[in-house]
């Protein structure tokens, strides 16, 4: 029997990737032209998947591509090592790679060797003997950040660098990372960069006046996938994998999932699994609600933990966001109905919910980001 055609929690590749044609064209064009692009959206909208598609296309055109997730490093020095290693992989011969890196990095003596990864594969490792002071790290950073242009020149290829979850540089003494990067990348005509960030507030602040990245390049704000595209896509994927759907099922999934790409794929994937486990060949709206009930039960302990960590004003504000669909939260009427207290304390509670990524602002309204959390709050809290 067919495999589950829906993918979530990992980067989606071509058959499961929907729409984003304009965004992809723009990203490929800008990066190919050596621009420094900022890609911003909340988590799970599809930035990493979009970047992967763009890099794939650029690689087919002959560019060397490097893809790094900044948030996966535990220190600035570890990030620099990971970055240097990813860049070195563009040079497949270890002896040449070592010589090249030693020449490019003067502030410390880099060690390059092969090591066996936990997966059993051997891979290149780079380490910089601990740079002791912040000044040492900054000097090293300036040298590492110059490497992409070096590679572009020596290999005579375009280089494209993706720094995903870029807002995480804030934790590595962000100001100096931004300064060091801006100072070097500006002159790198043959290198395209995409800085992708999942915390819109942090990213927008990073692009503000008086910050190093102010006007450094085009900004793309990734929105949701239009429902009119996503819903038929979902139904087609069900059908092609041998599963019939009740009319309107695609739209129901997109709606229940708040049209968040991750949540749409999750609900579709789980509904598909439940149908297969039950030996069914068709998915109805009732089946969908049963799947949703199962997911809520599974996530219950996690949501309970989130709820317990909220202050009382945050809990009432979160309930109001859910029950009012994020509208009119500051009106006297709403504040009385949900016992929210004064407008300024509601604003403070909403700001805290936005900061912790539970809620986002969408035009004129607030929305709970995780559609399962939204349903859980509606059903299990009072
Ligand atoms: N273009 C797309 N088509 C279909 N599903 C998508 C698309 N973009 C994202 N998704 C879904 O959303 C999930 C999260 O995408 P990801 O690229 O990791 O988002 P981000 O990097 O913004 O957090 C994916 O695993 C997939 O389920
Ligand atoms: Mg991502």
Image: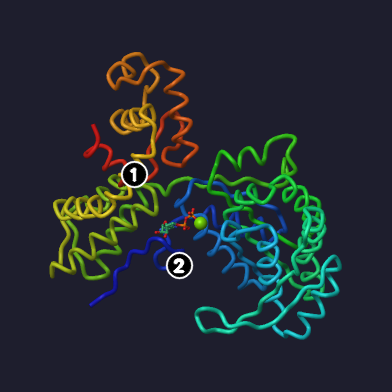
Farthest-out residue, front = 132
* Count of number-bearing discs: 2
Can you see residue 63? no
Looking at the picture, how far across and down is residue 344, in whole percent? Answer: 46, 18
Residue in the image at 43% along x and 28% along y: 349
List the residue tagged with mark 1.
Answer: 258
Res 137 quadrant in image: bottom right
Q: In this image, 227 relative to 30: left or right? A: left
Q: Distance between the residues labelled 1 and 2?
A: 22 Å
User: Residue 13 shows which numbered tag?
Assistant: 2
Q: Which residue is drawn at 75% across and 76% down?
A: 111
Q: In which quarter of the image is residue 92?
A: bottom right
**Residue labelled 1 has its Cβ within 8 Å of some atom of ligand 1:** no
Residue 9 percent coordinates (x, y): 41, 61
Secondary structure under the numbered disc 1 in the rendered image: loop
| Front residue (pair 318, 55) | 318
Disc 1 residue crowd, few under 14, some 14–19, many 20+, Cα 10 Å: many
Residue at image point 28% right, 46% down:
256
Which x, y percent locates residue 296? Answer: 24, 50
Q: Quadrant of residue 56?
A: bottom right
Name the quadrant of the N terminus: bottom left
Residue reaching furthest top? Answer: 332
Mark 2, ligand 1, within 8 Å: the answer is no
Label 2 crowd (10 A; few <14 / some 14-19 / many >=20): few
Q: In which quarter of the image is the C terminus?
A: top left
> Is label 2 in a helix, a strand or a loop?
loop
Q: Is residue 100 above or below residue 301?
A: below
Q: Is residue 105 above or below residue 201?
A: below
360 w.r.t. 72: above or below? above
């Amino acid at each position: 029997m067919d495999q589950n055609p829906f993918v979530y929690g990992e980067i989606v590749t071509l058959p499961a990737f929907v729409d984003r044609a304009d965004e992809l064209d723009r990203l490929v064009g800008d990066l190919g032209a050596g621009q420094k692009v900022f890609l911003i959206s909340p988590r799970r909208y599809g930035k990493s998947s979009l970047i992967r598609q763009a890099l794939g296309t650029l690689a087919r055109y002959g560019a060397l591509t490097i893809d790094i997730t900044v948030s996966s490093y535990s220190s600035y020095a570890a990030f620099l090592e990971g970055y240097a290693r990813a860049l070195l992989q563009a040079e497949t011969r270890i002896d040449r790679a070592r010589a090249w890196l030693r020449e490019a990095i003067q502030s410390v003596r880099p060690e390059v060797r092969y090591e066996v990864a936990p997966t059993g594969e051997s891979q290149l490792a780079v380490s910089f003997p601990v740079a002791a002071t912040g000044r040492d790290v900054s000097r090293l950073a300036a040298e590492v950040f110059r490497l992409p242009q070096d590679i572009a020149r020596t290999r005579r290829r375009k280089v494209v660098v993706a720094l995903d979850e870029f807002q995480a540089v804030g934790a590595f003494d962000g100001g100096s990372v931004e300064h060091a990067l801006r100072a070097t990348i500006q002159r790198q005509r043959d290198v395209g960069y995409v800085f992708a960030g999942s915390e819109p507030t942090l990213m927008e602040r990073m692009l503000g006046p008086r910050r190093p990245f102010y006007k450094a390049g085009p900004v793309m704000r990734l929105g949701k996938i239009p429902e009119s595209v996503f819903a038929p896509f979902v139904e087609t994927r069900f059908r092609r994998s041998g599963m019939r759907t009740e009319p309107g099922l695609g739209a129901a999934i997109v709606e229940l999932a708040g049209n968040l790409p991750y949540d749409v794929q999750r609900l579709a994937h789980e509904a598909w699994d439940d149908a297969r486990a039950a030996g069914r060949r068709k998915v109805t709206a009732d089946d969908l609600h049963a799947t949703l009930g199962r997911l809520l039960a599974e996530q219950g302990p996690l949501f309970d933990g989130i709820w317990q960590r909220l202050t009382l004003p945050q809990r009432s504000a979160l309930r109001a966001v859910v029950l009012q669909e994020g509208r009119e939260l500051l009106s006297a009427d709403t504040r009385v109905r949900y016992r929210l207290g004064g407008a300024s304390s509601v604003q403070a509670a909403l700001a805290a919910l936005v900061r912790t990524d539970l809620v986002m602002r969408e035009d004129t309204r607030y929305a709970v980001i995780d559609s399962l959390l939204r349903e859980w709050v509606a059903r299990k809290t009072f």
